[in-house]
Image (cartoon, rainbow, N blue to C red):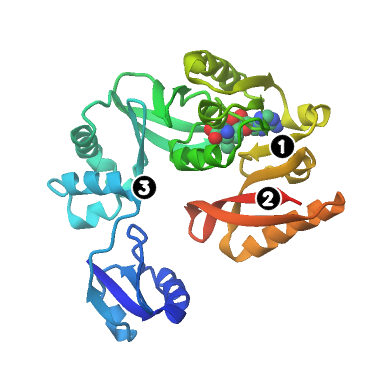
Amino acid sequence: MSAIKVKKSEAERAKRELKRLGLYDGRRRPQVEGDFVFLPVLNDPMLRELGYDVVPVELPMRPERQIYKNLESVLAERLTPGELQHLRRYDVVGDIAVIQIPPELEHRVDDIVWGLRRVHPFIRVVAKKGFHEGAFRIREYSIIWGEKRLTTVHKENGVELRVDLSKAFFNPRMKGERYRLAQLVKDGERILIPFAGLLPYALVIARYKNVKITAVELNEEAYRLGLENVELNRKRLRGEIEFIHGDVFEVLPELPYYDRVISPTPRGVDALALTLSKAKKCLHYYNFVHESRIAEFKNCIINECRRTGRECTVRVKKVSDFKPHVFKVCADVSIL
Ligand SMILES: C[S@@+](CC[C@H](N)C(=O)[O-])C[C@H]1O[C@@H](n2cnc3c(N)ncnc32)[C@H](O)[C@@H]1O
């Protein structure tokens, strides 16, 4: 495994250049040692031509790539190195494995299913994933192996979630983010969660904290699953959840203020002013932002706060990569 060794002061510039040239290996983490940083790179003679100090270093895999790595090593038995490069990340939701199959690997579907079943012997369905569609953010799926269903029960952060991938949005990759928020919440808070889906945020927070949560969701199927999930987890919950079926833009203006608002905003929807207007102390606002516009996004929140006569501090955290240079981010807003 290769890395380049650069001075700390040059690391950001070098990383940008490597990404631009497609030489950065985002599957591994950079590592700091004294005044130097080791940046993970792909094996390419161009690196030396560019004047970089290329060294053999074992850098740790990013956690979300770890299972991917296992599939990759299993499939190395059957796929060529060129084909392996096209392998995409996948998710396991309950007993369903969900994977994107690019056109370059369409002829390898049977091998990929074989690999997934070797890495996760408990899976009962393998589904090929398409794009998110419409306001309810539901993906297109086609089942490529196993039982003909997209319903399952997914376990996460000490709760069980009944999921129907064909009817309601669910993203297992937000597990760490939900845990992070549950740790920030304090007992006794009143919390509002618009765009609540089948209630993963509400349930994880109520599992750990004695709070009162009001959640709002428009998709009737997600709402129904959310109510089932409250029942499924009833004995585990320390907090209470009130779930409202309706449009956030109609329901929120009628609701009171909350200590904390958590907005897992769907892509392309602007609910900043509305959600901020309901927050007394904290807002966690999710959005999709190009890395060059993060400062602008932050200022936009500060200005919106000032418009309502309040001051705030904003910390923007990158939650996951969405497409090159565009990230799903969470703005943690503290109202002063
Ligand atoms: C990005 S998903 C997040 C769902 C859930 N919070 C999660 O993380 O799994 C956005 C959710 O907002 C819902 N939604 C979209 N527009 C809405 C609206 N105007 N009012 C209420 N819910 C809405 C969608 O149905 C979807 O469940």
| Disc 1 target residue | 259
Residue 43 in view: yes
Determine whether, in the image, residue 315 is placed left or right of residue 96.
right
- Is ligand 1 closer than 8 angstroms to the Cβ of mark 3? no
Determine whether, in the image, residue 263 is placed left or right of residue 13.
right
Is 160 in front, or is 222? 160
Could you tell me if the residues under marks 1 and 3 are in contact, i.e. CB atoms within 8 Å? Answer: no
Q: Look at 30% across and 52% down and name the residue there.
A: 86
Q: Look at 34% across and 42% down and name the residue there.
A: 101
Is 247 in front, or is 191? 191
Quadrant field for ligand 1: top right
Q: Secondary structure at mark 3?
A: helix
Q: Amino acid at mark 3?
A: Glu
Q: Which mark is residue 333?
A: 2
Q: Which mark is residue 64?
A: 3
Please tell me in which quadrant of the rendered image residue 299 appears.
bottom right
Residue with the most extreme front position: 187
Q: Tell me: residue 300, above or below residue 233.
A: below
Q: Amino acid at mark 2?
A: Val
Determine whether, in the image, residue 124 is placed left or right of residue 329.
left
Determine whether, in the image, residue 311 is placed left or right of residue 210.
right
